[in-house]
Image: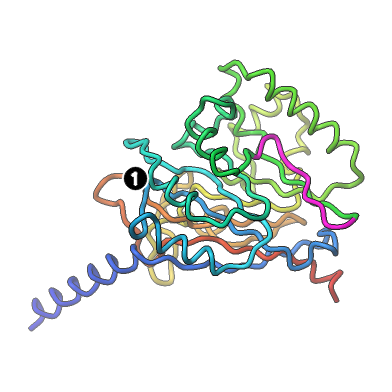
């Protein structure tokens, strides 16, 4: 009986995993921060990340229909639309084609796309041209979102730009950065939301990043985190989870990385971070599936509980 029971358990686990990898859940989270302008209480951001060329039904019908049911003010695409082996943009275009054309919509690139680079964000690049076709704007270097007299500022992570030291950046991008930075620096105490494919660690500073920003960018040690909130992808939420343990492994964070910087919402020293598990998979072919961690889109509600009371 024991071998039969073990075989049955294996069949059930495999069947559940196959089913679990084909569904999509909405990860509804609240990001609290005491500095959030009161006019943005309840502001909703829908995050789509790490598609990795995956399709959910013909022409992405399952994913599109789920997104259409959500109420949101801003749509963010946060990178990794293709896989390392396949640069087919059809799954991404099917998604873009089916989405409602309303509200603010922005995108950034991930490491699988163009190595997080900003250099391709001009006409003639396949990602730029495809998103432009469906009126989704590149989030570089950032954007001011206004509600009445109040604003929040979306900014891209400046430290993924370390790849740019080996490439020539187009003049139009340099000009855009200079214009945005002047407007941002002239604003009074801007509330900043960093939008980055790779999470900026909220609890410690990566040694490579520290050397890059202090030696190359000339920043001071106390400028490690200069945002109020951060919205990220890349980690797939750990991709494989175990009961009571959580993520088994994550890109950049190794084995049993815990949840901070990997999945969910975390707050530390006045900074609030959200890492969405995303939709697709990566890694060795035998491990390209999710376990107890279904594909997801993030529905983020901003809140300032202190001011709202």
The vertical placement of 76 against 18, above or below, is above
Q: Name the spot of residue 89 as percent of width and height, x first.
A: 40, 40
Q: Quadrant of residue 247?
A: bottom left
Indicate left or right for 228 with 121 as reference. right
In this view of the protein, which residue sits in the foreground, 194 or 76? 76
Most frequent secondary structure within the magenta stretch: strand
- Which residue was labeled with disc 1? 283
Residue 32 magenta-drawn? no
Q: Residue 273: percent from the left, percent from the top?
A: 65, 55
* Residue 144 placement: quadrant: top right
Q: Residue at x 74, y 28 (%)?
A: 177
Q: Residue at x 85, y 76 (%)?
A: 309
Query: Which residues are the magenta region?
Result: 139-148
Q: Can you say whether 64 is above or below 169 in the image?
A: below
Q: Is residue 158 left or right of residue 278?
A: right
Give the secondary structure at mark 1: loop
């Amino acid at each position: 009986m024991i071998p039969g029971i073990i075989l049955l358990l294996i069949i059930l686990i495999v069947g559940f995993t196959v089913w679990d990898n084909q569904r999509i859940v909405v990860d509804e989270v609240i990001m609290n921060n005491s500095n959030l302008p009161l006019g943005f209480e309840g502001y909703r951001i829908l995050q789509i990340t790490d598609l990795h060329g995956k399709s959910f039904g013909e022409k992405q019908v399952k994913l599109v229909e789920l997104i259409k049911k959500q109420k949101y003010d801003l749509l963010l695409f946060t990178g990794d639309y293709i896989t390392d082996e396949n640069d087919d943009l059809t799954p991404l275009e099917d998604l873009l084609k089916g989405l409602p054309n309303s509200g603010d919509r922005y995108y950034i690139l991930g490491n699988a796309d163009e190595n997080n680079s900003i250099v391709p964000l001009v006409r003639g690049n396949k990602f730029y041209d495809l998103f432009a076709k469906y009126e989704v704007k590149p989030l570089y270097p950032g954007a001011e979102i206004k509600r009445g007299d109040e604003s929040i500022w979306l900014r891209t992570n400046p430290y993924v730009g370390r790849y740019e030291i080996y490439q020539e950046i187009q003049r139009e991008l340099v000009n855009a950065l200079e214009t945005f930075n002047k407007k941002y620096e002239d604003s009074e105490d801007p509330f900043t939301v960093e939008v980055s494919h790779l999470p900026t660690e909220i609890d410690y500073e990566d040694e490579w990043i520290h050397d890059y920003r202090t030696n190359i960018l000339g920043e001071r040690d106390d400028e490690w985190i200069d945002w109020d909130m951060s919205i990220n992808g890349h980690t797939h939420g750990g991709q494989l989870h175990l009961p009571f343990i959580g993520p088994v492994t994550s890109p950049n964070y190794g084995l049993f990385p815990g949840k901070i910087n990997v999945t969910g919402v975390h707050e530390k020293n006045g900074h609030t971070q959200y890492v969405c598990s995303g939709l697709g998979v990566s890694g060795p072919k035998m491990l390209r599936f999710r376990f107890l961690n279904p594909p997801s889109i993030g529905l983020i509600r901003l809140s300032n509980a202190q001011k709202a009371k």
